[in-house]
Amino acid sequence: MFSNNDVLETIAMVEKEHLDIRTITMGLSLLPCIRDTAEETAQKVYDLVCKKAENIVKTASDLSAEYGVPIVNKRVSVTPVSLLCAGFPSKAPLIGKALDNAAKTLGIDFLGGYSALVQKSTADYEKIFIRTIPEVLASTERLCSSVNVGSSKTGINIEAVKMMGEVFKECAYLTKDKDGIGAAKLVVFCNAVEDNPFMAGAFHGVGEADTVVNVGVSGPGVVKRALEKIPDANLTEVAEMIKRTAFKITRAGQLIAQEASKRLNAQFGIVDLSLAPTPAMGDSVAHILEEMGIQTVGGHGTTCALALLNDAVKKGGVMASSRVGGLSGAFIPVSEDIGMITAAEKGAITLDKLEAMTCVCSVGLDMIAIPGDTPATTISAMIADEAAIGMINNKTTAVRIIPAIGKGVGDQVSFGGLLGRAPIMPVHACDSSKLINRGGNVPAPIHSFKN
């Protein structure tokens, strides 16, 4: 039973503390759409997505009105597209454009899954497919792309890592008139998960049901407000408060996910309890860390505070739902977090510190703008570093880097909306090209042989 205090507390979370359901994401298997030609396959893809997801926007609006909780994004994720077009990889852009058209028809925010899984090696058709990514992201509006280049079981595919450094550069160049937004719709993973509802990395895994609903919950403002009530608490008490708050947030997500899956005739997948920030004041993960006792995020102690936050969020979430999944934890995208933006503008947070923080939180180097003349091999080396962290620690890590063509340190890029804005951060000038050009694979760590 809910008490009056529980009801009032939830209302306050929504109205004052930015509690929201960040996304309802419908995952769709496109494997039944494969036909002999790219043209036929693209048409089947468009038809299936429009049919299966035709009510997602209405359902989200209805649930938001009924329960009083904002549902910010309505999204779709699909089977990695490279699997659909192994027989005609050079024509994969036809499928990408069909998916983007479906997203526009449905009125959803983003559609993820223009993706490839090349964690061990890169098949010839995958190489061709990956080279289509810049063209497709430059010519579409709502389509997102991801590539998995490593895992704790297989090691790191350095050939794919090298390609993705070049792909990031080309994505940025082809969309330089929009501050390189093509690169902002691309993410490179190690240990990618199959049930992630967040963009740009969402895709529908081949181990999933035909139609699944995954919900992503977010509430950095709620956590910060909870900590403001215990300014002199010790860190054990801080962790306990975060756990309790995460429990409440997750229960809200569980309710919405169950109802959405029923109404959309889909299987209930997971609740992703990720503290995903926005550029709005009061909705920042960085500000949580500062509330815990760091003067400015990036200062000494930041990694410790983030480790506590990430762990407590997960512990509270798994007590509230048996279906917690995705990337659950705390996100630290620079352009999407007003506290991170401020710290980067001050020079308080650097790429090196962000890399250290990714060892203990969700995902990795996310939405970071760098000088446009950064060599592709340097970007590949950043990807390799993050993949190594994920591989060794058996966690998901990722890179979403935006080379700002024609801009340098002191400038900024701006995308608006949830993607926000970012100051361009300095990159180490030392050359990493010899390492990347060696190719081959970084072998998996010894724990990969656990069975």
Image (cartoon, grey):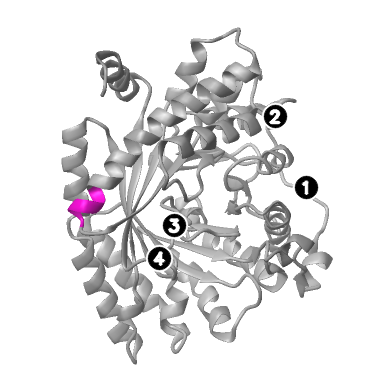
Crowdedness of circle 2 by 10 Å Cα count: few (<14), some, many (20+)?
A: few
Residue 91's disc number: none
Most common SS among magenta residues: helix
**x, y percent for residue 177:** 46, 54
Dividing the picture into quadrants, the one containing residue 164 is bottom right
Q: Which residues are magenta?
A: 260-264
Q: CA distance from mark 3 to mark 1?
A: 35 Å
Crowdedness of circle 1 by 10 Å Cα count: few (<14), some, many (20+)?
A: few
**Can residue 282 be spotted in the picture?**
no
Q: Amino acid at mark 3?
A: Asp
Residue position marked by numbered label 4 in the rendering: 208
Residue position marked by numbered label 3 in the rendering: 195
Residue position marked by numbered label 2 in the rendering: 304
Q: CA distance from mark 3 to mark 4?
A: 8 Å
Q: CA distance from mark 4 to mark 2?
A: 35 Å
Q: Earlier in the sequence, mark 3 or mark 1?
A: 3
Q: CA distance from mark 1 to mark 4?
A: 41 Å
Mark 2 or 1: in front is: 2
Q: CA distance from mark 2 to mark 3?
A: 28 Å
Tell me if residue 263 is in the magenta stretch.
yes
Q: Does dot 3 land on a helix, a strand or a loop?
A: loop
- Vertical order, 440 against 416 (above or below): below
Q: Are marks 2 and 1 in contact (CB under 8 Å)?
A: no
Query: 346 or 435: nearer the eye?
Result: 435
Q: Earlier in the sequence, mark 2 or mark 1?
A: 2
**x, y percent for residue 345:** 61, 30
Tell me if residue 352 is in the magenta stretch.
no
Q: Earlier in the sequence, mark 2 or mark 3?
A: 3
Q: Earlier in the sequence, mark 3 or mark 4?
A: 3
